[in-house]
Amino acid sequence: MRRQTASPYLLLPLLFCLVLPVAARGSELEPQSGKAEMTFRLPDLHDQEHSLPDYRGTVVLVNFWASWCPPCVQEMPDLARLQQRLADRRFQVLALNVGEKKYRVRKFVNLIGFHLPVLLDTTSEIFDTWHVKTLPTTFLIAADGRVRYRALGNPDWNGGPSARYRHRGQLMKIPIRLIAGTSLLSALLLPGLATADEASQREQVETLFRLTQMEKKIQESVDSVVRLELQQNPQLQNDRKALEDFLQKYIGWDALKDDITATYMRAFSEQELKEMNAFYITPTGQKVITVVPELVQQRNRLAMERLQQHIGELRKMIQQKPAP
């Protein structure tokens, strides 16, 4: 058999890895000490200079990358989507290219259709100053200009890995995709600051709860649990009050309101909440609130009736199953 010889061109990526910063894969956000002295002033592809202090009041994601780095290229569409999802927030992605000439970078970003601001660290000075060792490396900068988080590698910014942070002394994990939620963005990057955006978003959630009668639905769920529990355990009838108090304490409206509100704030932007409220306030929206739960019950009853009607067929299928 003829022995094949590796082409020297195939060895070029390996040589790049040996002499240039290592390309990393997969990551979690790591909390940083909040250093304020880390900054830069760099030109973009249009010779306009960008300085980190210019973005004070905005949460900034600084991404160090290079065109020869496959994980860097892989995450660029994710970064573009993240910027798009946060277009109405004080959030900006800055793609900081390391060690490549302007013409090469311009040609590359035009080729892939990347339209976020691309800054040029041609001499790798900022790369060294920020103590970056691998590509891609990403920093999340709070609105006060301090570095709060770092990611080594290419986390899935729209889902997947987790961000690690400390809450009341405990190490917590949160899916990175939730960074795109206004409330979480504020909680992670602007600790202690109740932003006007967050307050406005919370108000929209509370309006949605009123329109959809969320408190009433929670109470109906509690009552349903009580009825079911008493049917299955008649001996608890004399302790009904204790059972109701117990359920109200843990799954009642007052117990769940804050958690449910936070869940909705992570799931929906303020604009999406406004759109939902605009619908639910209409006669059609109010009809949906009333009718849909009944339709769901009808669907469930229909499904159960169908299964009961044909349960004999399932028994035959099991009986006719050939022995292994």
Image (cartoon, helix red, strand yellow):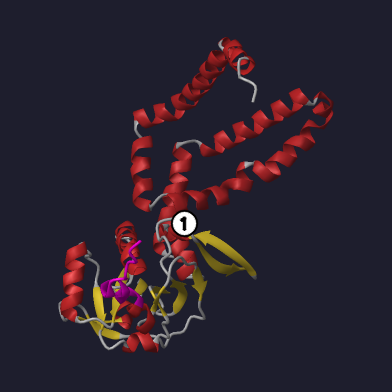
Residue beneath the point at 16% across and 81% down = 47
The image shows residue 232, relative to residue 69, as above or below, that is above
Query: In the image, residue 232 lies at what x, y percent?
Result: 76, 25
Q: Secondary structure at mark 1?
A: loop
Q: From where the camera sits, is residue 297 visible?
A: yes
> In the rendered image, which quarter contains the C terminus?
top right
Residue beneath the point at 52% across and 38% down = 214
Query: In the image, residue 293 lies at what x, y percent?
Result: 49, 26
From the image, tell me which residue sits under label 1.
Answer: 160
Residue beneath the point at 18% across and 80% down = 102
Query: In the image, residue 106 lies at what x, y percent?
Result: 17, 73
> In the rendered image, which quarter contains the N terminus?
bottom left
Instruction: Magenta stretch: give its range.
Output: 1-14
Residue beneath the point at 24% across and 81% down = 100
Camera-side residue of 152 and 92: 152
The image shows residue 290, relative to residue 74, as above or below, that is above
- Mark 1: which amino acid? Gly
Q: From where the camera sits, is residue 67 visible?
A: no
- Seen from this angle, which residue lies furthest front? 1
